[in-house]
């Protein structure tokens, strides 16, 4: 697929993206290329530090993935300390992921339709939980397994890697990890350290998204850093 020549309409939702939208369309093709031949259906989006642009990247990437074909995409807000997807997609934050796993809500109540056809979102839900033990619960892996059968892609807007104890475990649960690198804020050396740490725990970095870039760089998603 020659994704660079495809025309994709920018969805009319307020992500605050302007010229960056075209980057995310390119990323959609790059993800499919990176995943080709492999069954990469679930992706954990992380970054070195807070505020690097994971939620913006995750949302735009998921939207781009729904545009190309009939892909059904589920976005999960897995940043329990700083949930944001519900605001971006104009949804209630509860019930959501935590409510589902604690048995306080049913799956049909926590998977919400968005304004974008084929794009669904599971907000974080009630966030007064310990993320480390929450994600290590066997129910989380079980839920992911079940949801994979209903969606073409599951994209998990996760916590940052350096500051959060649950991230190394999360890196091992998903088929692939995508590292958001903020062009203006992340030192390349730090990005390399995080990539190595993810590999060390057995996670698979399938690519890195360079966010907030100011200058022309040939690819926004690098195969491996
Ligand atoms: N490419 C971009 N274009 C415009 N604004 C952006 C872009 N990337 C990030 N931002 C802005 O930067 C801020 C942080 O972005 P975002 O919430 O996506 O980061 P995050 O990594 O998810 O943060 P957290 O660690 O809190 O989860 C937001 O105000 C967002 O709107
Ligand atoms: Mg976020």
Image: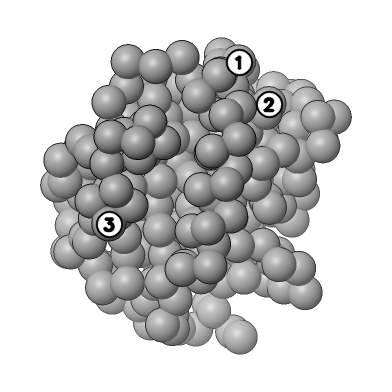
Question: Do the numbered discs 2 and 1 sit on residues whose CB atoms are within 8 Å?
Answer: yes
Closer mark to the observer between disc 1 and disc 3 = 3
Label located before the other in sequence (1 or 3): 3
Q: Is residue 114 visible?
A: yes
Where residue 168 is drawn, which disc sits there? 2
Q: Give me the residue at 62% from left, 70% from top.
A: 32
Where residue 108 is drawn, which disc sits there? 3
Secondary element at tag 3: helix
Where residue 165 is drawn, which disc sits there? 1
Question: In which quadrant is the N terminus drawn?
Answer: bottom right
Q: Does mark 2 have its CB less than 8 Å from ligand 1?
A: no
Q: Give me the residue at 56% from left, 14% from top.
A: 163
Mark 1 nearby-residue class (10 Å; few <14, some 14–19, many ≥20): few
Q: Is residue 60 left or right of residue 188?
A: left
Task: Give the alpha-carbon distance from disc 1 to disc 3, as whole Å.
Answer: 30 Å
Q: Residue furthest right?
A: 200
Q: Is residue 100 left or right of residue 39?
A: left
Which of 74 and 23 lies nearest the eye of the viewer?
Answer: 74
Can you say whether 219 is above or below 213 in the image? below
Can you say whether 210 is above or below 162 in the image? below
Which of 73 and 207 lies nearest the eye of the viewer?
Answer: 73
Can you say whether 83 is above or below 66 in the image? above
Instruction: Determine which quarter of the picture holds residue 135.
Output: top right
Task: Give the alpha-carbon distance from disc 2 to disc 1, as whole Å.
Answer: 7 Å
Q: Give me the residue at 78% from left, 26% from top.
A: 197
Closer mark to the observer between disc 3 and disc 2 = 3
Mark 2 nearby-residue class (10 Å; few <14, some 14–19, many ≥20): many
Task: Give the alpha-carbon distance from disc 3 to disc 2, as whole Å.
Answer: 29 Å
Where residue 180 is drawn, which disc sits there? none
Q: Position of residue 201 (x, y in %)?
A: 81, 29
């Amino acid at each position: 697929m020659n994704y660079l020549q495809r025309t994709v309409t920018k969805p009319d939702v307020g992500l605050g993206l302007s010229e960056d939208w075209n980057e995310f369309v390119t990323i959609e093709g790059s993800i499919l290329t990176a995943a080709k031949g492999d069954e990469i259906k679930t992706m954990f989006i992380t970054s070195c530090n807070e505020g690097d642009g994971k939620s913006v990247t995750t949302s735009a990437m998921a939207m781009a993935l729904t545009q190309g074909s009939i892909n059904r995409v589920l976005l999960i807000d897995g940043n329990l300390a700083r949930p944001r997807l519900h605001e971006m997609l104009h949804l209630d934050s509860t019930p959501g992921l935590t409510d589902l796993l604690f048995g306080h809500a049913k799956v049909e109540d926590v998977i919400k339709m968005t304004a974008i056809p084929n794009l669904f979102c599971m907000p974080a839900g009630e966030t007064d939980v310990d993320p480390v033990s929450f994600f290590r619960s066997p129910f989380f892996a079980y839920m992911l397994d079940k949801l994979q059968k209903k969606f073409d892609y599951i994209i998990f807007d996760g916590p940052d890697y350096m500051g959060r104890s649950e991230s190394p475990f999360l890196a091992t649960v998903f088929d692939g990890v995508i590292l958001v690198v903020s062009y203006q804020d992340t030192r390349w050396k730090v990005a390399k350290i995080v990539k190595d740490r993810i590999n060390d725990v057995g996670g698979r970095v399938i690519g890195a998204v360079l966010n907030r870039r100011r200058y022309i760089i040939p690819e926004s998603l690098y195969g491996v850093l």
